[in-house]
Image: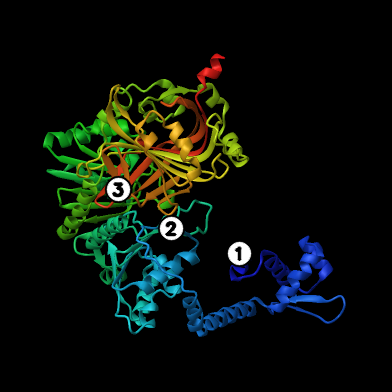
Amino acid sequence: MLKTLVGLGLTRLDSQVYIYLAKRGPQKGQDLSKGLKVQKQQLYRSLKNLQSKGIVNATLEHPAVFNAVSFDKVVDIFIKAKMAEAQRIQENKDEILANWQAISIGEGVDATAKFNVIEGRGPVYAKILQMMNETKNQLSTITTVTGLLRADQFGLFETGIENQLRPRIVFRAITELSEQNLGITKNLLKGIKTAKVSFEGRTPDLSLNLPQLVIKDEEEILFFITPKMNDSAKEQEDVCLWTNCKSLVQAFTTVFEDFWRNSTNINAKLSELETGKPAPKTQIIEDAETARRKYNEAVKGAEKEIVIITSTQGLNEICENKPLQDTWAQKGVFVRIMAPITSENMKAALQLLRNCDVRHTPLGYLGTTIVDMKQLFQFKNAPLDQQTPESRPSFEKTFYSNDYDYVEKTKSMLDDVWRNAQAPSSQTLEAINRAGAIASALSETAIPKTLKRIYRTNMTVKEENAKQLTEEYLINKMVGAEKSLPSNKPERPVTTYSTNCQALIRPPSQLNLPDILIHVYHMDKASTYGAEDVIAIFPWLNTPAGYAYVPAALITDNPKARNFWKRFLAGTPAENNVRVVEKETLQVRTRGNTLFVGWTEQIPFIQYTLPPSCLLIEGHGNLKTIAYLVTVASGYKMQTEGNLFADAFVTFFHPTSKYSGPGTDGVFGRDVIMEFYPPEDKSTTSK
């Protein structure tokens, strides 16, 4: 209730006073002061403010007794005040605009791509409403039924009849339907029809981990990055990334159109759910054991081809089922398996590659198996906020169909997923770890293996330091950090407190880019140079010392730190390729174990150019505490302590490609402290 009242426009103290009076009944000022533990001067100022708004009444006796107005009347007061304020602005609109024009402020056209973060449900839906009002032809969205309901509550669909001079726009929505939200969806569609909005809705045939987004006329996009709700949370704040970068808008428009083509009309799906009559040759198998027996018979009896999407643990179970693999091999069955690939099942994935094709997909895909294009099984996943790489599909209420049209359509969608998935590579792992030999110290402390392959970099593992550190100690050290004053003197050490990530991406061949190691840093304001977002680019290149990740470019949004980075990167190609960009051009956002980074400018490095893109990095597994020392080409020593997830899923968004990297190709550093010590002055040392 405090949050609600503050949102209506009251101060926190005013809200506390009102709630106290509403709960306790009439009170004297002295009793209020004691009950709320507030000084009388502050209290009476608050009471006067509440009285002026008509929210609190006072008797004429001395000392006065204060009484709270009923809450329903308070809500009415605020509604009338807001309506009066809006009417006053509307009435004075012409005068306000005339005064503005009189100032003679020139308006330049800013063609630069923008990238903004919008937080909070009110601002987010206000932005969507603005996009709807400015739409000329078409507004497209992928959202939940709840999201559509909130949009309706914010008046989104009413905009279709507010301006009769504007031609009717087309509103397209993709959302997942279920028996649970059937009634809500029907009522919502009736309301949209009444609002006279040209609405088209579809629901995906294959339940996927759909991104939530809004696209306006292929010119702007609002991308939801709201974190997954944890077990204890009841409500979560909406967080969105907005951009008008043409490349990114085009990329997500392509994603939307793919989903749209492979979805069913929402009214047809509603009819199917409402009547309870499944399509011919389609059923829900309620009993788990019955479904398991039918599934086992189908996969054992396969004659030509099997396509499977499963979990990390599901991949391990297939690997352990040797008799089933032998049966497939004897019959010459072509088997394709997609699953989240992490360090826990990489060995199983490489073993299965001997007889099957295996590729990585992120979490969220519905467990699905198609046998010989004749039978389709889909399994109930755990709730998205509870999914882990170890989760396995449940056989309870298994969806089954042998309807050829439905199976063919689903198979086509799985083929799209397969084409955009990444295959695990034992050769890549061997290249990173020098013929597959991972030093025991590295495996024990979870030091990112790629650090040992960076050009002219030496790393020393601080095992004893790591054993003495604890997760809690590092968190407290970061929370209690005091900013050190920046200095232009190069001999001064630099300290940063950050969340950082490593992502190894292997761009598709059509991009003409090498494999690239990307470091992303989200610096806290307590760092020496203050808050800062940084992207460092390390392409995999042939050097005089052999292949290595070469520091080739660094992008920062903090001009104060530019000279430091140049000194740190001295002796590498990146020394002369440190660029400072506007904050709207580079954005790094973190939520829990997830980091999202997007950039709207091209990043040139050596003879290559990395186009505007996005990276989503999701850490998982066990959190580990690490400590190590790195010496780089410039002579700088970097002492690092941190809590990190040695495995992370990597998703690379690019206008013309979709990429998902195996779990071992990402590292998520949640709480990281780095201390940079400049090289010693040899002349001073000799003296």
Helix, strand or loop for disc 1: helix
Query: 483 or 29: nearer the eye?
Result: 483
Q: Amino acid at mark 1?
A: Lys
Q: Is disc 1 in contact with disc 3, using a CB cutoff of under 8 Å? A: no
Q: Earlier in the sequence, mark 3 or mark 2?
A: 2
**In the rendered image, which quarter is residue 402 located in?**
bottom left
| Location of mark 2 (residue) | 116
Judge left or right: residue 531 versus residue 400: right
Q: Which residue is mark 1?
A: 3
Give residue 535's position: percent from left, percent from top: 40, 42
Determine whether, in the image, residue 504 is placed left or right of residue 234: left
Residue, x 46% and y 22% (percent of image)? 460
Q: Position of residue 485 (x, y in %)?
A: 60, 39
Q: Earlier in the sequence, mark 2 or mark 1?
A: 1
Q: Which mark is residue 611?
A: 3
The mark that comes first in sequence, 1 or 3, is: 1
* Amino acid carrying mark 2 in the image: Asn
